[in-house]
Every structure is written in C-alpha cells, then in structure tokens.
Amino acid sequence: MQYAKKTFFDGEVLLMQAATIQKRIESIPTLSGSGRKINGLHRLLRSSYLFERAYEKVSRNKGASTPGIDGKTFDGITSSELADIAARVSEGTYRFRPARRVYIPKGNGKTRPLGIPTVEDRLVQEAVRIILEAIYEPVFLDESHGFRPRRSCHSALELIKKTWTGCKWLIEVDVRGFFDNIDHDILLELLKRRIDDDRFIELIEGMLKAGYMEDWVFERTYSGTPQGGVVSPLLANIYLHELDQFMQTLRVSFDQGRKRRPFAAYAALQHRVHRLRREVERLRATSADQGQINAVMAQIEALNRERRKMPSVDPMDPNFKRLRYCRYADDFLIGIIGSKQEAREIMTSVEQHLTETLKLAVAPEKSGVHAASKGVTFLGYRISTFTSTGAGRKSDRKGPDGRKWRILRRPTTGNVSLRVPRERVTAFCRRHGYGDLARKNGHRRVQFAHTSDRNIVLAYNSEFRGFANYYVLADDVKKALGLLELVTLRSLVKTLAMRHRTTTAKIRARLSKGTDYEVSSVIRGEVRSLKLWRLKHLRRLSWTSPVVDNVTKGAWWVKSPNDLIDRLDTRECGICGDTRGPFVVHHRQSDRHFRDKPLTNRNLGTALRRTMIFCPACREVASSRREIPHMESRVH
C-alpha cells in the first residue's frame, strides 16, 4: 500500500492513504447522480496525493512553461513543495495570487484577455477541478459538449446532424464577454446546491476573487473567471448548466404531437396509385389486352415519380412542434420545428433567462432567428437544412440470397447539412502563410529556412491534417479543401527549393513517388521515408477526444526532437568543434543575442537557443558563465 505525503493540520499528523482518497473520489459520482449533497471535500486536499496527480496533468499542458506573475515554471518542482501546498490549503493559509493578464489574437482580428495563474495556483485549481468533475459530470446533460471527457465539437455537430432533421428555424443567441461576466455570487450559490462543505466553497471563492495583474497594476475581480485558468472551463459549465436545465424545461412545454399528419397532396396521389393498382389486378384477372395493362402501369409510374418529389407528412403541421438545443461552452444553438413567431418567442424567453437569472448580457447584433434552409455558422461549420427536388436515386443492394435488388430511395427532406465555410479556408491559408488561394499561388515560408526537410514536411502535415480532421464531418470537406491542398503543396515545394537553393521542378522530381510525395532522411543510420499528407488519406471518422478542437500549429516543428537527434548524431561540439566526445545537451533560455538579427537568423537562433550540443568542457564554461561564448558567430 502506497501512502501519500504527510501533511499537518491543527497540530496533528494526518497520514492519508492514496488508495483511500482515490476510492472516495470514485464514490462521488454515484452520490452526486442520486441527488445527494457532497461533503468532506476539503479533507481530500489535506494530502499531497491530489496535488501529485495535478502536477502530472498540468505539467504536460501546452502552457506549462509559461510563468505567472512570480516568474516560476514547473521546472524543479519537488515533492516537498507539493506537500507544503497541501499543508497550506488544509490549514487555510493558502492565498491565491493575481493572474498575469495577457492578450491573444482572435480569429476576427480582435484580442481576447487570458489570465495566467502562478504554478502553485494552477496545481490547486487542478486538484479542485478533479473533485468538481467527479461531482458534476454525472449531472451534466447530454446537450453540453464543451470541455468534458469524451466530448468535443464533433460530438456536438454529430448530435445536430443526426437529430435535427426537419428543423425550420435556427436561433443564435450570443453572450457578450461570458467568461468576464460570470456573477460570483450566483456561481457560489449554484455550487452550494450540490456541495455541503463551507471550507471548499471558500477556497473556490478565494480563487475567483484573486484578481489579475496588467502592466504591473493590480485589478480586483468582482465577476468572471479568467480564460486560461485550469478550472475555469468547468466552472463555466457549472454556471451554464442552469441554462441547460432551463432549455430542458422549455422543451417539455414546447414539444407537441407524436408524429406529423399525412401530407394531403401526397395522400391523394397515394390513393390514386392504390386505385390504379386494383385496376391492374382486375384487368389481369379478366385477361385484358396487355396494351391496356401497360397504359395503366405507365400512369402508376408517372404518379409515383410525382409522389417521390414531395414529403409523405406535412412539414408545416401546426400540431407537431419540436425544440432542439446544443451547447459547446458559451456557444449554443437552438433548432425549432414550428412557426417563426414561436421561434421568436423561444428566443425572447432564453434572453430573459440569461439576463434576469444568470446576469449575462446578450449581444443583439449577433443574435437572431434564421431560416434553417439559409443556415448559420456554429463551431466553425456552416449548418443548414436541405430538401432535394429530384425523383429519388437508385441503390443496388444484395439480399440474403446474394441476389441484387434495385431500391429507389426517396429524396431527402429537411436533412441537416454540414459544410466548410469558404472564409475559414481562406483565413487558415493566410494565417499559415501558404499563399494566395484565389491565384492558386504558393508562398515559401522563411521560418523553415534552417529546418530539416523531414521536419518541414512534418510541419505541413501537422497543420493541414489537423485542419482537415476538424472538418471531417463536413459533407463537402474534400471539395472545399481541394484548392487549399494544391496551394499547400506548392508552398512546400517552394520552401524546400529555397532551403536547397534549387528549382521547384527539381524539388518536385525529388519528392514525387508515384501518386504520392515523400522525403527521405537518415536517422541513426537508417533511411526513413515520410509521406506528405493529402486529402486522399483523410478518414471520415469523428473525433470524440477534445484534442480535435485544437488545430495544430506547425511552427512547433521548427525546433523539434528530431533536429536534436540529428545534431547529436553529428558528434561535434557546437562551440569548439571537438569531435572526440562524449557530448552533452545544454539547455539555454535566453535569446537576447539574436533580437537585432534579420528574421531568418532570429528563427535559427530560436531553434538553437534551448538546446545545444557541447563537449563537457564547454558545457562547464557555459553553465558557469550562464552564456554561450562565441555563439553569435554561428548566426550571420
């Protein structure tokens, strides 16, 4: 049996078994799902076990090396420090520090504030998040998809595609500045409905009111939860769970009818077909002329063609109404089967609930009721409904006996279509510097000038594959991304031609391997090939992992582990040129020597600054002086 670290509380030594804590956490979902309030949560934080779990999770996050206001990162965190955090939390002396506020660009050209907590605060937030997730995950509704285990944008979009058939109206309601305007008092009251532990609630309150630092000026926070906080997405889901429950209640009162009434015109044609079929049976029974029978059969076929062009049930049946709802974080969409007036009334009810109950502001310029046939943009997809006007399409299928059967399928009516917005493709191409889509012209990317061929292809693959995988659910994904694929290939060829100082024709000839393009490289004495990822490799499968929501940034490959391996394999000191060995990897943070260099040289300096290959003597000099002698000479 493994024990967690010792912590101190009220002068008594508390030795808590890690297995006991884990068992307690695993019992929470059952209790919470049954509607019981959960207590004894603050006791779970007395041991460093949860903080060790938190460290394992948070230290692997993308922003783990980003410091808070104290300048500290996760490098060098020890077990004793984790135990000290647990002790301060359990004693009630832990105080959250203000988050460091930075601004990151949004897709529309504006900026979004991001709060970066200190390392200690991130660990405490993650420990709290583990407990809160065990409480709330069993009670969250199926319509909620953001920041939840085994759910993603794809799970939300699949729900819409499969269950929103027949929707006539789509309602958009935009919440203005959601994360900055969460009411602390309302959030704490919502937490108290399911948590019976005042000390645990007080810990969360201290987290919410820690404030933030901007330009070295402290600002108190009276509302909101900072984007960038580890627990912020879960707190946002807890807050908007009230909206989910409101929509569930609204749906129960709005939905009406078990099924639609028959469409009158369709029923009339069906009745005529039935009468003509009886006429054919009568003619055959009386051994009538085959010409008469064929004439009646022709009438039946003509009526069937006409019938297949229309729905079998009345799409505007006033006695059949449905409300559909889907939410991803603070973005949500409502679908209505009913009249436009009813859709407007639903929108008004939702806006009133947001403003009066949750104290959230609605942006009227971004909200509205839209015809489903015209569509809206939700989670980056263009969502609309469509009805085909053809007489149907034929499909050959094999029966149980192996014989082929020709089935005439009815045209679709009100099915949901997911498409790739053209502007998203253009923005992606521009953001990554691929080139000009309109002119089908690829651009070379100078940031890869000093990167290996393999890593350049890895970067392009990572970017393009990530973008295509996000839009894999779109009906037109390959058609919409076909031009982007062409420009991507041309950009890659020009980038490699720039690196090797040769022509694009020679690069194409070198890359071309039948219908594919690939590069070869020697890694540890072995020749390895890497194919350029293309749309023909796209697998039409959805992703339930939230990782699909993060489109990869290929610039990571400018400085990758493979480059480090390549430089180790050269077996040469990066300073004195010694080739005798042994060699060590030196990690370096500062890039001040390269700030005044041209762009391509700065990129090389960035790639070199963190890891260099030294002999032991040069490593000792570099470590003691905290700088690398003569490194500037490597950048011209």
Image (cartoon, helix red, strand yellow):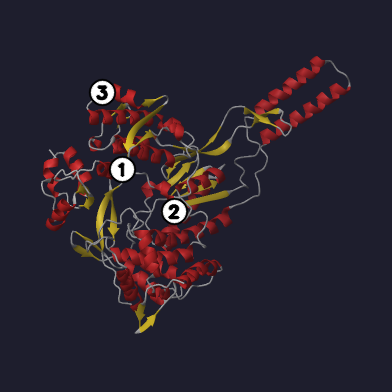
Eyeballing the image, is 34 above or below 111? Answer: below
The first of marks 3 and 1 along the sequence is: 3
Check if mark 2's residue and mark 1's residue have beta carbons within 8 Å.
Answer: no
Horizontal arrangement in the rendering, residue 197 relative to residue 507 (left or right): right
Dot 3 alpha-carbon crowd within 10 angstroms: few under 14, some 14 to 19, many 20 or more: few
Sequence-first tag of 2 and 1: 2
500 and 444: which is toward the camera: 500
Circle 1 residue: 562
Is any atom of residue 270 visible in this view? yes
Q: How crowded is mark 1: few (under 14 residues within 10 Å), some or many (20 or more)?
A: some
Say which amino acid is labelled 1.
Answer: Asn
- The crowd level at tag 2 (other Cα within 10 Å; few <14, some 14-19, many 20+) is many
Q: What residue type is labelled 3?
A: Thr
Residue 539 placed where, x, y %? 48, 37
Among the 4 quarters of the image, the one containing residue 502: top left
515 relative position to 280: left or right: left
- Looking at marks 3 and 2 on the same chain, the residue that comes earlier in the sequence is marked by 2
Which residue is tagged 3?
503
Which residue shows up at 68% across the image and 31% down it?
Answer: 398
What residue is shown with label 2?
Answer: 146
Which percent across, then down, holds residue 621?
Answer: 13, 54
